[in-house]
Image (cartoon, coloured by chain):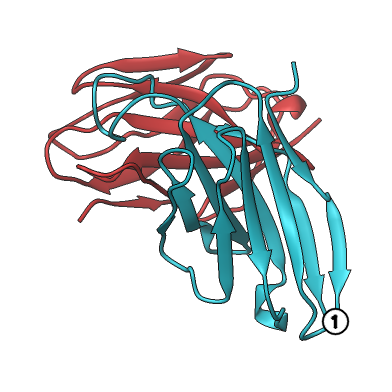
Amino acid sequence: GNSVTQMEGPVTLSEEAFLTINCTYTATGYPSLFWYVQYPGEGLQLLLKATKADDKGSNKGFEATYRKETTSFHLEKGSVQVSDSAVYFCALPTSGTYKYIFGTGTRLKVLA
Amino acid sequence: NAGVTQTPKFRVLKTGQSMTLLCAQDMNHEYMYWYRQDPGMGLRLIHYSVGEGTTAKGEVPDGYNVSRLKKQNFLLGLESAAPSQTSVYFCASRSGGLAGGTSNTGELFFGEGSRLTVL
């Protein structure tokens, strides 16, 4: 079945540093891939997604490229801000069902 | 824009007590989900519903029951709460077909969470 593995946190960076959060997956076929973000005290919200191989999703300065050869969907941002401090989840659908699988989440803390 | 609303947001129970969490969405979504979030374990699916009057088990259904009597509401019940059910519970909804299909955007809309403590 489908699965997702996400790098463990927490990740602590200084403001304006470069961010990478790794996500790899196993899946049947080429499902859509998602990154969700959870700000403190809130529910998850969609950050970006990619619907097919080699697609790049982007939003709020974050980017992730759907790489089928390495089965990865790493999240990147060139210059993080304090306001990016949150927990980030990689997710993908379970093929042929109505369900989604989430990674364990990576907590990011950005220091001023 | 209400989106997905969960009530209550906080609750403390004693072992053996019962309670119901209510999830309401105003987006006319067909699919609704209940997840629990625990440290180091990400989100785990408890139950889900693909339409009014239907429910199905997720990864960790034991100890929980659900009902979807109205399309906009999805209730999660704990009949006899246990300390292992201390968690943050999230409801989510979406539109469209199969999770990996092309007929939907795939986006899940989440509530703000309900923090439950069982003593």
Residue B13: image location, x then y, percent: 85, 74
Q: Colour of chain A?
A: red
Q: Observer-nearest residue: A91 or A77?
A: A91
Residue A96 in picture, x, y percent from top left: 20, 42
- The cyan-tinted chain is B
Furthest residue in direction bottom, as rendered: B16
Query: Which residue type carries mark 1?
Result: Lys
The percent position of residue B53, horizontal first and vertical second, equals 47, 46
Residue B20 in the image: above or below residue B75: below
The answer to whether B64 is drawn above or below residue B51 in the figure is below
Rendered location of residue B92, percent (x, y): 57, 39
Residue occupying the point 46% across, 22% down = A48
Query: With A107 as the anchor, is B19 left or right in this view?
Result: right
In this picture, residue A4 sits left or right of residue A107: left
User: Residue placed at 23% from the left, 33% from the top?
Assistant: A31
Label 1: element kind: loop
**A38, B68: nearer the viewer:** B68
Residue for badge 1: B14
Quadrant position of residue B79: bottom right
Quadrant of the image containing the C terminus of chain A: top right
In screen coordinates, is A85 left or right of B107?
right
Would you identify the image quadrant in which residue B26 lies?
Answer: top right
Nearer-the-camera pick, A79 or B102? B102
Q: Is residue B113 left or right of residue A80?
A: right
Q: Is residue A100 above or below residue A50?
A: below
Quadrant (top left, top right, bottom left, bottom right) of the N terminus of chain A: bottom left
Give the answer, above or below, for where A12 lies relative to A15: below
**Residue positioned 78% across, 58% down in the render:** B115
- Count of marks, rendered view: 1
Which chain letter matches label 1? B
